[in-house]
Image (cartoon, rainbow, N blue to C red):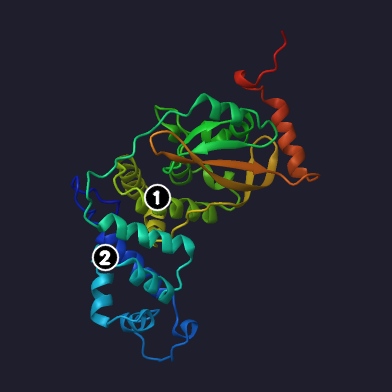
Amino acid sequence: MESPPESRAGGPTDNRADIRGFLTSRRAKLSPERVGLPTSRRRRVPGLRREEVAVLAGVSTEWYTRLEKGHIGGVSEDVLEAVARALLLDEDERTYLLDLARAARPARRRPYRRKDVEIPPSVQWMVDSMTMAPAFVRTGRLDVVASNALCRALYAPMFASDTTGERGCANFPRYFFLDPGSRDFFVDWEEGARATVAVLRAEAGREPHDRALRELVGELSTLSPDFRTMWASHDVRIRHGGVKRLDHPEVGRVEMTFRSLDLPLPQRAVHDLIIYTAEPGTPWEDRLKVLARTRPLPPAAQPNRA
């Protein structure tokens, strides 16, 4: 089982296993042909060799081998950028590598431990005002901490799931991997599950001192073989958007696009505001309207009849 490590206050995070797993997995995905290197039939493992990555990055094989073993704390950003280019990392992967390096460096002051913050009423009012677009606010651990009525209607199976626990807080990873009903609800379950794990992996690199995140990863790694496999792939995703297809128990198939927006909050917290929309004039829009009509507006959004 692999989970984000905890560091000593004021010291670097011992994330060598994460660094090693990430760089090894990225190297394994590259073929010599893709990076313009000559091919050879005698390859014991898939992907590039360490010495080939070293050549592409302009460093010695010994130096890159040490880096891949997790000794990244003292490496300059320019060298990390060269390694990122050699491995053809995308923007999210590059950011994750820099986050890992930042966490591995000795801290000049006590590391900031993120605390959960209450959602300001104004944020809830904003979300409630979107009556024809399912919208919600989620934390980096993918807890749903604010939502509008249409979101709760759309995601009724998740909000009603036993995975919400005693707090009654819906959590996407727990629902995906611990509730068997999620496989029927999400039309593209595997794609969504992999994206969910990739978002958690990126959050683990960005917030290595988040105890609740470590506990969540540990819980899912223990209880779900699928999660363990996907977590071990070291895929990362920061910007999460695209198409969501759900098989709703009341209205049937619904297809929507969604976008994620950063929502800065007090105490340096940053959550995501997720907004779903259905293409106008489609059956999906009609089915969202049906859901909207069958669910009363939340108290904050009720019209003033005075």
Residue 259 located left or right of residue 63: right
> Is residue 134 visible in the rendered structure shown here?
yes
Residue 116 located left or right of residue 134: left
- Secondary structure beneath disc 1? helix
Q: Quadrant of residue 152?
A: top right
Mark 1: amino acid: Glu
Mark 2: amino acid: Ile
Between 220 and 59, the residue placed more toward the observer is 59
Disc 2: CA contacts within 10 A as few (<14), some (14-19) or many (>=20): many
Q: Seen from this angle, which residue lies furthest top?
A: 306
Tell me where residue 68 appears, x and y as whole percent.
28, 71
Q: Which is more foreground, mark 2 or mark 1?
A: 2
Query: Which quadrant would the N terminus be assigned to in this image?
Result: bottom left
Identify whether 167 is placed above or below 55. above
Disc 1: CA contacts within 10 A as few (<14), some (14-19) or many (>=20): many
Residue that mark 2 sits on = 72
Identify whether 245 is placed above or below 271. below
The residue that appears at 44% across and 58% down in the rendered structure is 236
Q: Identify the disc placed on residue 203.
A: 1
- Secondary structure beneath disc 2? loop
Query: Which quadrant would the C terminus be assigned to in this image?
Result: top right
